[in-house]
Image: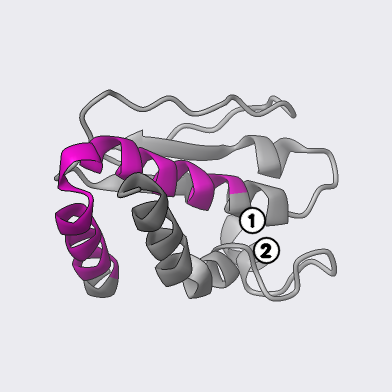
Amino acid sequence: MGTFSLQLRQFAEKAAENADEAIKNVALDVFQRVVVRSPVDTGRFRANWRLSVGAQDLTTSESVVGQAPTLPDKVAGSVLWISNNLPYARPLEYGHSNQAPNGMVRLTVAEFGSIVDQAAAETTR
């Protein structure tokens, strides 16, 4: 988590005027990548990803249709959470699906630096 905080702090310094917009763009990009990489059987797992600000959203749903996340106008300095609270989320992340043998979150975490760099470049133009 420390690495993310440092990268986001550096990013916010680069994009100071548009920090909220840029951080929201990073969060939504990361969220979308995790969701798209999620294996699909019934769709329930994919639909249970949550993006929240300040505290982890611990809810789950029986729905197989996900909801588009919304973020408040001001997010700079807040902790953003991406979570999936279904009991099989951890096993799926660690290879229990042929559709996502390398996980969803771990792959996205590996791309985080480039996601931040791209958002910073777009925001500071």
Could you say which is closer to the camera, residue 104 or residue 29? Answer: 29
- Which residue is rendered at x = 59% and y = 71% of the image? 107
Disc 2 is placed on an element classified as helix
Amino acid under disc 2: Leu
Relative to 20, say whether 33 is above or below. Answer: below
* Magenta stretch, main secondary structure class: helix
Q: Which mark is residue 113?
A: none
Amino acid under disc 1: Tyr
Could you say which is closer to the camera, residue 88 or residue 101? Answer: 101
In whole angstroms, how far apart are the C-alphas of marks 1 and 2? 6 Å
In the image, residue 32 lies at what x, y percent?
59, 45
Residue designated by label 2: 92
Residue designated by label 1: 88
In the image, residue 52 lies at what x, y percent?
36, 36
Instruction: Please indicate, yes or no, whether residue 2 appears anywhere in the rendered image.
Output: yes
Name the front one of labels 1 and 2.
2
- Which residue is rendered at x = 39% and y = 64% of the image? 117
Could you say which is closer to the camera, residue 74 or residue 100? Answer: 74
- Colour setting: one colour
Relative side of 34 to 3, left or right: right
Relative side of 52 to 48, left or right: left
Disc 1 is placed on an element classified as loop
Could you say which is closer to the camera, residue 65 or residue 60? Answer: 65
| CB-based contact (under 8 Å), mark 1 and mark 2 | yes
- Which residue is rendered at x = 85% and y = 46% of the image? 41
In the image, residue 39 lies at what x, y percent?
77, 54
Quarter holding residue 24: top left
Residues shaded magenta = 4-32
Q: Is residue 25 part of the magenta span, yes or no? A: yes
In the image, residue 125 lies at what x, y percent?
35, 48
Relative to 37, say whether 31 is above or below. Answer: above
Total count of labels: 2
